Image (cartoon, grey):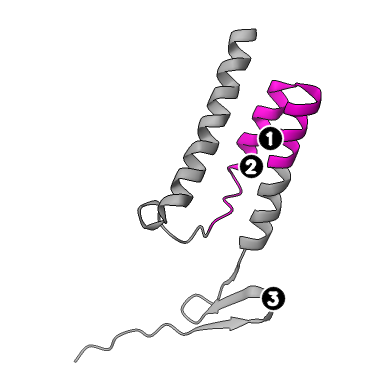
Amino acid sequence: MQKTKRILVTTKPHNMIITKENSTKVRDTGKINRIFYGGFVALGLYFLLTNHDLSSAMSNFGLALIFDPFDQKVRWNNRPLYQRVWLVVHLAIVFVLLGMLLTII
């Protein structure tokens, strides 16, 4: 008879998850990602609307995509439709700004 491995997952304070198998601490970064995402989007809007600086706006909107505001543990195909549409539209805005920047130069 073959023994199966059991993995014990416990939730610790401060959003720390420790697994028994590898004893590594994994931090839940969902709240931090939303803060950085919102900050970079706000910075992009600031540069776009007040300074009319397309390059800074485009780079800040692009950097915002690094900090996915949704649950990153969920695969792309399993995400709700509104999340996929949100991220694709965000990426399209970055490409539109890039196209506008390249046609100006």
In the rendered image, residue 40 lying in the magenta stretch gets the answer no
On the image, the x and y values in percent for residue 84 come to 44, 47
- The residue that mark 1 highlights is 60
Q: Nearer the viewer, mark 3 or mark 2?
A: 2
Disc on res. 64: 2
Q: Nearer the viewer, residue 90 or 72?
A: 90
On the image, the x and y values in percent for residue 40 come to 70, 42
On the image, the x and y values in percent for residue 85 come to 45, 44
Asked if residue 67 is positioned above or below residue 21 in the image, the reply reads: above
The answer to whether the residues at label 1 and label 2 have Cβ atoms under 8 Å apart is yes
Q: Quadrant of residue 15?
A: bottom right
Q: Nearer the viewer, residue 83 or 69?
A: 83
Asked which secondary structure carries label 3, the reply is: helix
Residue type pointed to by label 2: Ala
The answer to whether the residues at label 3 and label 2 have Cβ atoms under 8 Å apart is no
Asked which secondary structure carries label 1, the reply is: helix
Q: Nearer the viewer, residue 29 or 45?
A: 45
